[in-house]
Amino acid sequence: MKILEVKNLTKKFGGFTAVNNVSFSLEEGQVTSIIGPNGAGKTTAIRLISGELDPSGGQIIFKGAKITKASLNKHAIRGISRTFQVPSVFSTLSVIDNLRMAARARHIGKVAIDDRCKEILEEVRMLPDMNRMAGELAHSKKRILEWCMSVIQEPDVLLMDELGAGLADSELTSLYDLIKAKAKTITPLFVEHRLEFVFRISDRVIVLHEGERIADGSPSEIKSNEEVRKAYYGGD
């Protein structure tokens, strides 16, 4: 079942076209990634879908409703959440208070919130850190905390931009295993430059190059795609 559709999405900044006529859809429960060389338009595409940027053209349809011009907050209310390239946490609050703040959007009772916070922290092996100030955490743990803050809101779609930045391979492996496990209820779309992880957990990979979609298929199909190889490594 299609949960999100992007139709002919375009974004121009003056005379520069960052995203050009890009179309794709997300299937509920499917792990989808967007890859491409630097400057391909990956982050811009995520910002458009999340409502952070208004598109110059095209449509975004979420669960059958057009949300093309909706704001970031309205997207969150509807059921679309996102993480950022730089971790976005409340540095002066404890780890568990960060999660409590995020959970309030779901109007869950206080006891239920605390139980859910501890459950998520245990899943990512951060329960011993729950009373630490978020600002004291290492970059990798801030990144994981931000993901937890998104997950606790129980969105239908979670957009992730370079979630693996600053994470060791073992940390990223554990986190992506959780993303895969939760895909049944939270459909993920992520941008990631570490292709070994992309190909390991993705059901589907979308490739952008110079703002345009040049390939869309399974990891094995993308690995053997000649146009993708040329985009990354050059050659005729």
Image: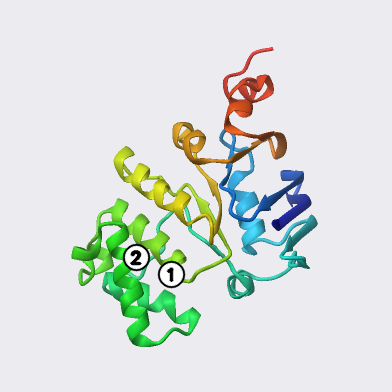
Indicate which disc residue 217 carries.
Answer: none
- Point out residue 157 in the picture as x, y percentages from the top left corner: 58, 61
In terms of depth relative to the viewer, which is nearer, 130 or 202?
202
Contact flag, marks 2 and 1 (Cβ < 8 Å): yes
Residue placed under numbered mark 2 in the picture: 120
| Picture quadrant of residue 32 | top right
Where disc 1 sits, the SS reads loop
Left of 141 or right of it: where is 65?
right
Identify the mark nearer the N-term, 2 or 1: 2
Q: On screen, 154 above or below 22?
A: below
Residue placed under numbered mark 1 in the picture: 152
Residue 166 appears in the picture as rendered? no
- Point out residue 54 in the picture as x, y percentages from the top left corner: 71, 62
- Point out residue 62 in the picture as x, y percentages from the top left corner: 71, 64
x 61%, y 56%: residue: 47
Under mark 1, the amino acid is Ile
x 36%, y 44%: residue: 172
Q: Quadrant where the C terminus lies?
A: top right
In terms of depth relative to the viewer, which is nearer, 68 or 152?
152
Q: Quadrant where the N terminus lies?
A: bottom right
x 29%, y 70%: residue: 118
Left of 20 or right of it: where is 73?
left
Q: On screen, 161 above or below 106?
A: above
Where disc 2 sits, the SS reads helix
Under mark 2, the amino acid is Ile
Residue 178 appears in the picture as rendered? yes
